[in-house]
Image: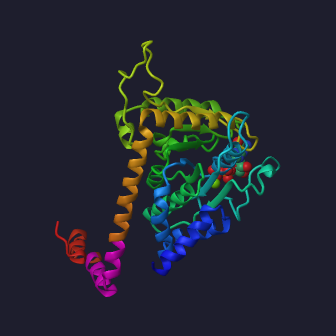
Amino acid sequence: MTNSQQDAMSLIESVLSGNRLALSRLLSQIENETSSGMAALRALFPHTGKAHLIGVTGAPGTGKSSLVNQLARGFRLPEEGKTARKVAIIAVDPSSPFTGGAILGDRIRMRDLAGDSGIFIRSMASRGSLGGLASATAGLVQVFDAAGYEIVLIETVGAGQGEVDIARLAHTTLVVEAPGLGDEVQAIKAGILEIADILVINKADRPGVENTERALRGNLELAHPTPRYFKNRGHTKKPAQNRDQAGQAALTTFWLPPIKKTVSTEGVGITEVLDEIDRHRDYLLQSGDWEIRDKARLQAELENRVRQMLFKDWQDSLPETEYRQTLDALFERQVSPLEAAEKLTGLKR
Ligand SMILES: Nc1nc2c(ncn2[C@@H]2O[C@H](COP(=O)(O)OP(=O)(O)O)[C@@H](O)[C@H]2O)c(=O)[nH]1
Ligand SMILES: [Mg+2]
């Protein structure tokens, strides 16, 4: 065994025995892609595949962090008859007010969670490239999954393609909207309505909720459930032949994203969102889409990692001056971008 493998093994043992400091160290190693971090990922991977990954995305200020806090609380302190689940939170939004493991939001309500060892919060430093962010996030998710966190909540700012990539990590994606952020519905503007499994109109205590709901509903009917939508999400579209004996369409035939209203600062509507999350999980498992999404996620991570590895390898092997000279030639339009790429990679198109 190499030193980094040994380091990784002892760290993994501590993590699996519930040591939070070790967990925190391992997460940093994975974020920084150290060799013992990568060795740990290899060793942990066979223990993954159990966690329910829940993406929470939407424009800044819609209340994602507040909602995530409330959902975490709900998973930890469930209604009677349900068991508490271990929750990890990954805040990809660098501006998220999760600091030092403190749970913000309504402090009075959250006080009963202080010191709860069943919650772990991690903020991600932002990365140069979105691909890097997606890989790093995938690595953290795998650690939490292997460490027995049954729920992994991933908060991202809804800002376009990068969001869609990270949302691909999730089994269930919540898109958060809020009234009164201008005339337009942010999720529609950002093109992230299509990735929603559950739509949440947060700040339902604010004026304009009805307008937001109407706009969302109208757009949902356009967006769901089209074949393209199902294809994009790695879904199989189950045809209506899947009927039970009473001739009713089976409940699992397809999923139409529900719209739920919440006031996250007050904890209003949270139970309903939690119920929808569990209902979506049941739907995924019964329809076989859980497995399909898992495979789509793993394939996306593989391809993302290949892209990054090859690019980095190429970058490292390239003399700085050659790159500069080619760039200059490109800027002076002496070579085209394609020619420059062929020259720098030695490949032909
Ligand atoms: N009125 C109202 N304010 C809220 C609600 N949820 C969050 N906020 C406030 O909106 C602001 C932004 O919330 P935050 O959770 O940080 O949003 P994020 O940027 O989407 O993560 C904070 O000041 C919250 O206290 C809500 O349901 N109603
Ligand atoms: Mg936030």
Q: Residue at x 25, y 77 (%)?
A: 344
Q: Main secondary structure of the magenta part?
A: helix
Most distant residue in the right direction: 108
Between 220 and 125, the one lying in front of the other is 125
Between 16 and 242, the one lying in front of the other is 16
- Quarter in which the C terminus is drawn: bottom left
Ligand 2 occupies quarter: bottom right
- Quarter in which the N terminus is drawn: bottom left
Residue 338 located left or right of residue 308: left
Q: Is residue 95 visible?
A: no
Q: Residue at x 59, y 57 (%)?
A: 90
Residue 111 located left or right of residue 151: right
Most distant residue in the front direction: 1
Most distant residue in the left direction: 348
Magenta-colored stretch includes residue 312: yes
Q: Residue at x 62, y 67 (%)?
A: 14
Image position, residue 69 (x, y; %): 69, 49
Image position, residue 272 (x, y; %): 65, 33
Magenta-tinted stretch = 311-330
Between 1 and 175, the one lying in front of the other is 1
Image position, residue 175 (x, y; %): 55, 43
Magenta-colored stretch includes residue 327: yes
Most distant residue in the top direction: 246
Total residue callouts: 0
Q: Is residue 346 above or below residue 212?
A: below
Q: Is residue 121 above or below residue 70?
A: below
Image position, residue 260 (x, y; %): 61, 33
Q: Is residue 78 visible?
A: yes
